[in-house]
């Protein structure tokens, strides 16, 4: 409570009411001072309650900020995961059609090259492979015939040559 000022002796008013006027004046002054004291007390309580309320609001604000930041971070992570999944799906969707188009283009190119070679009279890769197989078979048969011929020649070389007797005519 605010200290009150000591009472001053009441001075007479100019109308000369005397002690009744001074008592009235003192009572008015006391009421005035009581009102000032009540106002000072109310302000002190308001400051105290206001600071407590302010501190409570700050604490609630911090809690709300933490919750909202956590929720926002969670939403950001969900969005990033969804975005990554979309980009992976999109990438896979693009790679497969491109691969199919490359294969189709490759076959188209091979067919055109084969037609151009045929029109020039050049053999295809399959015809060349068949020809190589035939040459390999012929080389094997030739080597086999050569071995047999060499063996026959050796056998003939070992035995002496017979003289032919020609009958006289």
Image (cartoon, rainbow, N blue to C red):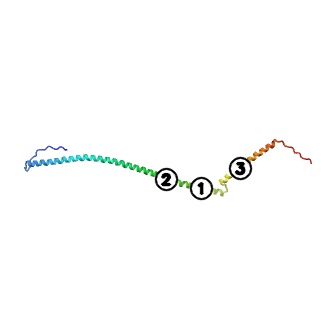
Considering the numbered disc 1 on the image, is that residue within a helix, a strand or a loop? Answer: helix
The residue positioned 27% from the left and 46% from the top of the image is 52
Is disc 3 surrounded by few (<14), some (14 to 19) or many (20+) residues within 10 Å? Answer: few
Q: Residue at x 26, y 47 (%)?
A: 49
Q: Residue at 14% of width from left, 47% of height from top?
A: 30
Q: CA distance from mark 1 to mark 2?
A: 28 Å
| Pointer 1 or 3: first along the chain | 1
**In the displayed structure, does residue 34 sit left or right of residue 84?**
left
Kindly identify which residue carries mark 2.
89
Camera-nearest residue between 93 and 125: 93
Disc 1 or 2, which lies upstream in sequence? 2
Q: Is residue 31 left or right of residue 55?
A: left
Residue that label 1 marks: 107
Residue 72 is situated, as x and y percent measured from the top left of the image, at 39, 50
What secondary structure is found at the residue carrying circle 2?
Answer: helix
Q: Residue at x 21, y 46 (%)?
A: 41
Q: Give the image quarter of residue 7.
A: top left
Element type where label 3 sits in the image: helix
Indicate which disc residue 137 carries: 3
């Amino acid at each position: 409570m605010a200290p009150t000022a000591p009472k001053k002796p009441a001075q007479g008013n100019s109308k000369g009411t005397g002690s009744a006027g001074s008592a009235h004046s003192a009572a008015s002054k006391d009421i005035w001072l009581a009102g000032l004291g009540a106002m000072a007390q109310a302000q002190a309580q308001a400051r105290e309650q206001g600071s407590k309320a302010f501190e409570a609001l700050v604490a609630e604000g911090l809690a709300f900020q933490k919750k909202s930041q956590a929720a926002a971070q969670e939403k950001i992570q969900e969005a990033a995961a969804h975005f990554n999944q979309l980009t992976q799906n999109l990438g896979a969707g693009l790679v497969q059609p491109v691969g199919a188009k490359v294969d189709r283009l490759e076959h188209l190119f091979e067919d055109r090259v084969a037609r151009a070679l045929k029109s020039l009279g050049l053999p295809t890769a399959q015809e060349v492979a068949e020809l190589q197989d035939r040459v390999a078979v012929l080389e094997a048969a030739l080597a086999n015939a050569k071995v047999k011929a060499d063996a026959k020649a050796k056998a003939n070389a070992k035995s002496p040559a017979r003289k032919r007797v020609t009958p006289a005519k």
